[in-house]
Amino acid sequence: MPDLQKHDSVVAFCIDRNFLPLTLFMIWQISHLNPQRRFDFLISSQDDLEIPDWAKPYGIVLHRSGSLPAFAEAARYAGSMSTVLRLMLARELGDRYRRIIYLDSDMYVAGGNLGRLMDIDLGPHPIGAVLDCPFFIRAEAHAEDYRAAGLPLLPYFNAGFQVIDTRAYQDQEVERRAFDVCRTHKSKISYGDQTLTNLALKGRFAQLSPCWNWQMDSVHPYLAHLFPVYHHHFISAIKPNLVSNGLFPVRFNQAYRDFFTQYAPEALAELAPPPKPQPLSFKEQARMLFDDLQVAKIASAMFARYPDPYRAVL
Amino acid sequence: MRSLPCWNWQLDHKYPYLAHYYPVFHHHFIAGWKPNRMPVWRLPVRFNQAYRDFMTQHVPEAVAELATRGMPRPLRFGEQARIMVDNLLSGHVASSLIDQYPDPYLARL
């Protein structure tokens, strides 16, 4: 057992080499916010990765993920299979870790105590996760994957942030059931392993507060003005590190720029230039006002539904 | 020497959207509008939350002094409209001010 594994819970990422700088950015943020952390960091990959010297004190465990079954190719998402690797985490790491918090690497960490979240009550569920963004836009959101599978309206989660109970995950054979979807689902697998896991669990997961996986920044940058967000998740292809013309506050792009300048200068070339430093236009503000008004009632109900970030709806 | 606004941004309590596209390095909570002292709806709750996270971990005796947050909620239409009008009225002034300091590491002498 490598010396780097010191705790019984872990914050894990599944990436290919292209996402290493973004992952290190998140680990750097989480370490800063959790100076007395009681969990390990782990990066699972099929690529050969090297942790830079400055990040070695974080004790990041590099895990070589096992091979995926050939039929899992159907779940390739955005050209990559790396997120599908997370389906195997509980089996591959379950003998060492009782809990895993899996994170996508396109997030900005603003707060929250992940050590405390590791102990959240998930009830009988193998996974705790946050509802997907359409649930914050429409009162009766019927997930595209459920519609395609002929399933009724059920809770559907965004897979970018998951609290995984490794024993429950293995006992309930979530990995096998998820991979089975590759062979049984008649429609296209639209969202990679997110589609697989949701179709396997069919709404049976512990619902976490949206503060852990806030997906609304690209369209509603001020919806969380009075709602404390811990993890901003830049879903879709419009991300503050990739585009300059999104509606994101520039502080996200600036944070990437500051970090890359100090720790990953090779990644600066890939970073989108910052938007022109000018006030929001009338059109942008009017659009934000209108868009927020449309979802205000639903957002209000969502905020009220999760009064405690460390208590899940079971 | 004139200081650059990104190093001492004093407008959060009145124009919370004004620095949307302007990278601020130091937010200065001037006068009585301080997120650790009183809940001010124009100030994003992330400032209060950052104090809360820090004090909880490092200075627990100071948590009692920290302003309590209001209930999490979206901004009301009237509140957002007021911010928008204020931004539009002052936007051109801010714009020309920001234009005077294109480089945070270059002062006007």
Image (tube, rainbow, N blue to C red):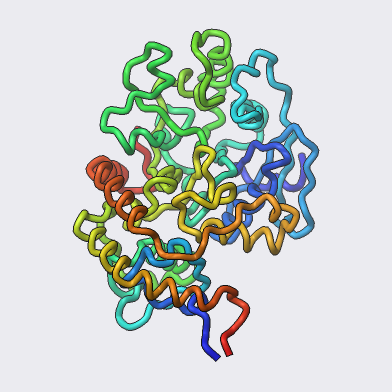
Look at the picture and state if A289 lies above or below B29: above
**Residue A41 vs residue A161: left or right?**
right
Residue A167, x across and y down, in percent: 55, 28
Q: Nearer the viewer, residue A226 or B54?
A: A226
Residue A208 seen in the current view = yes
Residue A35 seen in the current view = no
Q: Residue furthest left?
A: B78
Image quarter hosting the N terminus of chain A: top right
Q: Nearer the viewer, residue A170 or A243?
A: A243
Look at the picture and state if A193 lies above or below A279: above
Residue B85, x across and y down, in percent: 26, 64
Question: Measuring 66% from the left and 31% from the top, which residue is drawn there?
Answer: A82
- The image quarter containing residue A15 is top right
Count of all numbered marks drawn on residues in the image: 0
Question: Measuring 60% from the left and 56% from the top, which residue is drawn there?
Answer: A273
**Residue A283 vs residue B77: left or right?**
right
Question: Measuring 67% from the left and 43% from the top, which residue is drawn there?
Answer: A19
Question: Measuring 61% from the left and 31% from the top, which residue is drawn there?
Answer: A83
Q: Nearer the viewer, residue A294 or A118?
A: A294
Residue A60, x across and y down, in percent: 71, 48
- The image quarter containing residue A74 is top right
Image quarter hosting the C terminus of chain A: top left
Residue A113, x across and y down, in percent: 48, 53
